[in-house]
Amino acid sequence: MKKTLLTLTFVSVLSLCVMAQQSISGRVLDASTQQPVAGANVSLLHSPQATVSDADGKFILSGLKAKDYVLQISFVGYETSRKTFTISDKDLDLSVSLQAGQQLNEAVIVSATRANSKSAVAYTNLSEKDIKAQNLGQDLPYLANFTPSVVVTSDAGAGVGYTGIRIRGNDIARTNITLNGIPVNEAESHVAYFVDLPDLASSVDNIQIQRGLGTSTNGAGAFGSSMNIQTTTLQRDAYAEANNTYGSFNTWKHTARFGTGLLNNRWAFDARLSKVTSDGYMDRANSDLKSFYTSGAYYGNKSLLKFVVMSGKETTYQAWNGVPESRVKGDKAAMQAYIDRNGLSAEDADNLLNSGRTYNSFTYKNQTDNYQQDYYQLHYSKELSPVWNLNLSAHYTKGGGYYEELKPNQSFSKYGLDNVTIGDSTITSTDLIRRRWLQTDYYGLTYSSAYQHGAWNFVLGGGAYGYKGHHFGEVVWAKYASNSSMEHRYYENRARKHDINTYFKTYFAANSNVDLFLDLQHRNVYYSFLGYNRDLESVQQSVSYNFFNPKVGFTYRLNPNNSVYAFGGIGNKEPNRDDLINSTPTSRPKAENLQNIEAGYRFADKKLSFSANYFLMNYKNQLVLTGKINDVGEYTRTNIAKSYRTGIEAEAAWNITDQLRWSVNVTLSQNRVIDFNEYVDNYDSGEQQQTVHSKADIAFSPRLLGGSVLSYSPLKNLTLNWQSKYVGKQYLDNTQNEARKMDAYWVNDLRINYIVKTSLLNEIAVTGLVSNIFDVKYVSNGYTYSYIYDDVRTDENFYFPQAGINFMLGVNVKF
């Protein structure tokens, strides 16, 4: 039924057709030289209609009804121009002169790694307005929840604390994250932890999400998606804001922001201080998050120098073990069986039986994750000439922290300790509390230079990065101390990584309708780590990789309202830390390879915008968990020869009336592993049982995804938003087994935004959000493992339940 409704919804949007009436055309010129400005962004405010000027500076927008419009034209290095005009019964032809900007805009910092209408890739932009309307303290992935092909999840169940995002089924480790063009993904695990930057959204100006390989970027290559984030840009007027949010599960967000505006036409300073706390939906899954952001910038006539410092500190109670399937379903007999086969203590069994779907297996009061990251960025941009600019950035990220856990019945030998002898008894194990530490230093330089001449646009960029990681574990308490000392260090290893990438992009306007795109990247990776050699000795060793990642595409404008595009590219990605340290040179996995094809259609006029994108992501040597134990006794990811994702993404926005707008997106996809070998431990024989699966669905890859936002503005400053998200069935592993899956779910939210302007205060913005308004009981993430004992196979499934109906209310006062 849900699939039928989504399909009917989608078809109804496709069937809409708005007849063009009048058009506006014109030419964009440099005010001083009267030369054409190619590539200028031309749009109508409060309308989806937009285009870019061609090599002769010409543009056209059609399908306009008789009314007043505001035309906005912008281009890097120029002041944005806005012209108000009226369409009557005739077409208009305008000449627009752009004045060279007095201050260089921060857009130049991220422009080299951003996609545009000429890039022939699938992307979505989130503006500052979009972000502010949703920002109530939830983690950054939740701001992208209603964009195409996205699934978000939360360990604590309500979006505060550890969260995750998948785009086209690709997890965060395969998504390239940059912050002002600086890489964010952790160099060894490839994961970006947004919990380490609490309330980052309050200092974000815009976000671009690219799906597929996308354009070349900095850091670990995008291997399915990328998220390009830009923080606060120039606010010309001084401001101060106080934001407070309260919500379910005793969730609080307190944020204070201020900025000086542009001082002496040269200087600007911005700052933010935030604190977010929540008890979490899951038992004991509380979060205590603190962060700040500061920036200072000098805006010269043709240059920009900006220094950014931000920091986040998080303490979260662990909820990453999930909930056993029997507890989620409330099956008492199955829960008792789980207790018996896993040997739970009386205390743990009581916790399981009496907790409900919010069960958390951890009960030790300080079972917490504690981490802090400090970011330092220095950006310099220079306009060398009207057609040539240069960007240089230096960065340093300092990270440090640990997670603490109670571990019962641990062997002394595992911690390098002696057995304890008391009288005639020898004790070989003990209960203990341990901390596992990670301290990191990540530093580097990025650069880009863009040159435009006539129909050609060239970009040369890249970066060089260094990383040092110090991993160690400490025993901070033990029931039997043995021969340990205070904070006994039971393991320690150090890693170093170097990453150098260079990319060259060119856009060529073959004529007024055709744009060609070429993107070539070379990436060199060197990684030194403590791992096993062929003799199973733990020694320092290293690996290196050289990747060539080419991409090519074209865009063809059929007319001002319709365009088509096609894209083809190749990407490569190195194994992560766990893949390497838990293997030998014999069993070491290969790098992954992705061949990506995209093709799409875009339409936009005053009332309706629509796009459809076909994608094929063909993997070679994709790394997945198979259950196989390698030559060092570890369950590591294994290369599988062939797998693929293919499907269609479609999105549309319809301005039904001036007060009513509907945005909808749908993804239909097929995600398959061609041949998958599953390995299950057989405790009866001491071996592993192998099962071959052919053309099974890739784990965590729903075939159907849908999102919808219906917005109604009955009053000028009041907007009511009905938000819907549908996520199809997902499997927990690559066997497509119905016993190991997550059911589909459809969740609806109601969001209200109301803005009041007064003579005393600049603005009071009230945001209310009721999430999961129909109280759907659903899970958004999970994992599984299996074993055979007494000739019986057991599948242990664990899930992460999400909160039922809950609310948040935020008030932002701007002075």
Image (tube, rainbow, N blue to C red):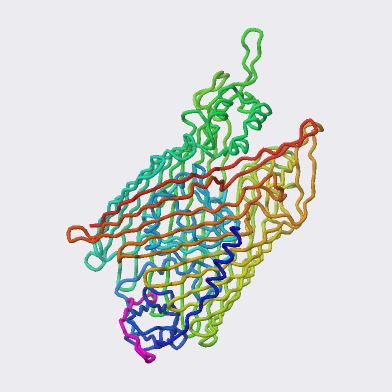
User: Can you say whether 148 is above or below 439 in the image?
Assistant: below
Q: Position of residue 91 (x, y in %)?
A: 39, 91
The foreground one among 207 and 429 is 207
Q: Position of residue 569 (x, y in %)?
A: 63, 69
Quadrant of res 250: top left
Tell me where the magenta segment starts and ends, as one range: 74-95
- Point 64% across, 18% down: residue: 419
Horizontally, residue 787 falls left or right of residue 728, namely right
The foreground one among 448 and 765 is 765
List the single residue furthest toward the top: 423
- How many numbered tags mark residues here? 0
User: Can you say whether 490 is above or below 585 in the image?
Assistant: above
- Point 32% across, 49% down: residue: 255
User: Can you say whether 470 is above or below 639 in the image?
Assistant: above
User: Can you say whether 263 is above or below 353 in the image?
Assistant: below
Residue 90 magenta-highlighted:
yes
Q: Position of residue 433 (x, y in %)?
A: 53, 27
Horizontally, residue 305 falls left or right of residue 667, namely left
List the single residue furthest toward the left: 760
Horizontally, residue 789 falls left or right of residue 349, namely right
Quadrant of res 179: bottom left
Where the N terminus falls, by quadrant? Answer: bottom right
Where the C terminus falls, by quadrant? Answer: bottom left
List the single residue furthest toward the front: 1
Q: Position of residue 643 (x, y in %)?
A: 71, 59
Residue 245 magenta-highlighted:
no
